[in-house]
Image (spheres, helix red, strand yellow):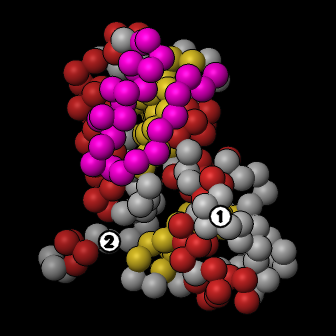
Amino acid sequence: MLVLAFDTATDVATSALVSDGEVLGERTSRAVTVLEDVDALLRQAGAHTRELEGLAVGIGPGSFTGVRIGLATARGLSLALGVPVAGVSTLDALAAGAPGALPVIDARRGEVFVLQGEPRVLVPQEVRFGPGTVCVGGGAVRYRAVLEAAGAQIPPDDDERHLPRARFHAQLARKFGPADLVEPMYLRVPDADKTRE
C-alpha cells in the first residue's frame, strides 16, 4: 500500500511517502509548505498521485493552526484524488519514534501535551514520570530545565526523536475512510472559541 503521510501540528512539519512499510522519502519543513513537500516526495520516488492508496495525517494535539492546515490539506487531497484518510495522534507518532520515551509537545501558554495513559494537557511541573525517563518532543526541549530537575533525561535539541516523523504516522494508520470523518485532537478550547463563551 502506497501511503502519503504528514503532520503539521508542531513547529516542524514532517512528511513521508511509504510503500508497504518501506520509506521511499521523507521531508521536514513547515506547515505552509506541506503541499510542496508532497510534490517533491512523489517526484523523488517516481510515483504519481493516482498510485496513492491512502493518506495518514497527524490530528494533533499541537498548534491549532497547524492541525487545521494538516486536516484541510488531507481533506483537499482526498477529495481531489479519491483516496481514503486515516488520522493518527501526533503524540502516538512521537512515541513510536522513541520507544519507551514520554512524548511531550509544547502546547504554548506554559503548558504541554503529554501521553500519560491518555492524551492530556498539563503545566510542565504536573507531568509525572519515573526517574531517568526519557522525554522527547518540542515540549521536552522547551521545558528541559523543569523536566530534568524532576529526573527526566532529555536528548540534545537536534535529536530526531524530538520530531513526530511522518513515517510513524504511516506505520500507525489503521482505519482509512472518508476524510470528513477524521477529527482533530485539540485537548482544549481554541483561543478563538473562548470569545464565544
Identify the residue position indicated by label 1 in the image: 136
The answer to whether one can see residue 184 in this image is no
Q: Is residue 133 visible?
A: yes
Residue 58 placed where, x, y %? 45, 46
Q: Is residue 46 magenta?
A: yes
- Identify the residue shown where x is 68% and y is 67%: 156
- Mark 1 burial class by Cα count in 10 Å: few <14, some 14-19, many 20+: many
Relative to 168, say whether 152 is above or below: below
Q: Secondary structure at mark 2?
A: loop
| Mark 2 neighbour class, 10 Å CA radius: few under 14, some 14 to 19, many 20 or more | few
> From what the image shows, is residue 4 above or below residue 1?
below
Residue at 79% across, 83% down: 151
Whether the magenta-drawn stretch holds residue 30 is answered as: yes
Q: Amino acid at mark 1?
A: Val
Q: Amino acid at mark 2?
A: Val
Q: Position of residue 73 (x, y in %)?
A: 28, 38
Left or right placement of residue 21 versus residue 73 in this view: right
Numbered label tally: 2
Name the spot of residue 176 as percent of width and height, x first. 46, 27
Q: Which residue is at a point 36% across and 11% down the rendered structure image?
A: 48
The stretch in magenta equals: 22-47
Between marks 2 and 1 in the image, the one whose residue lies nearer the viewer: 1
Residue to which mark 2 is pinned: 189
Which label's residue is closer to the chain start, 2 or 1?
1
The part of the image, by quadrant, that contains residue 193 is bottom left
Secondary structure under tag 1 reads: strand
The quadrant of the rendering that contains the N terminus is: top right
